[in-house]
Image (cartoon, grey):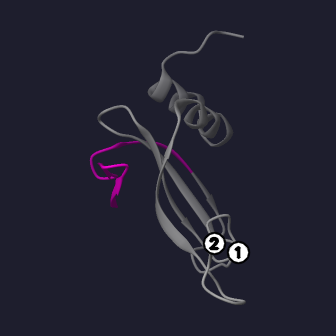
Amino acid sequence: MKKVVEGKLYDTEVAEEICYYSYGYSGDFRYCSEVLYKSPNGQFFIEYDGGPYSKYSEAGGPQKVYGSSGIKLVSEDEAQSFVEENGSAEDYIKAFGEPEKG
């Protein structure tokens, strides 16, 4: 997917995929898919796709709700939280380097 956000082109074909989250099947009303990427310039972004009852629903008029898909920018802190919740230790290291040992 390609999308221009804030005057810059974000392309999932050239960005590095870090990790993903998926819930349900694409035909489900509550379906949600999120893939975290890092652009060649270091900006993190999420490619999303969601059904009409997901967090990506959009109003389509009175009593009408639709699913949506797109790209949204996320901060480094948001990207770290996303990887901690949905990715592996290897995903974290790939994106942010070796963390301090606990």
Amino acid at dot 1: Tyr
> How many other residues sit within 10 Å of disc 1, few (<14), some (14-19) or many (≥20)?
some
The picture quadrant where one finds residue 38 is top left
Q: Quadrant of the N terminus?
A: bottom left
Q: Is residue 3 shown left or right of residue 21?
A: left
Tell me which residue sits at (65%, 34%) in the image.
Answer: 84
- Foreground of the two, 40 or 8: 8
C-alpha separation, residue under disc 1 versus residue under disc 2: 6 Å
The residue carrying mark 2 is 57
Disc 1 + disc 2, Cβ < 8 Å: yes
- Foreground of the two, 30 or 73: 73
Residue 6 colored magenta? Answer: yes
What is the magenta range?
1-20
Image mark count: 2
> Compared with residue 51, is residue 80 higher up or lower down, i.e. above or below?
above
The residue carrying mark 1 is 53
**Which secondary structure type mostly characterizes the magenta part of the structure?**
strand
Residue 49 drawn at (x, y percent): 53, 66
- Foreground of the two, 18 or 62: 62
> How many other residues sit within 10 Å of disc 2, few (<14), some (14-19) or many (≥20)?
some
Tell me which residue sits at (70%, 74%) in the image.
Answer: 53
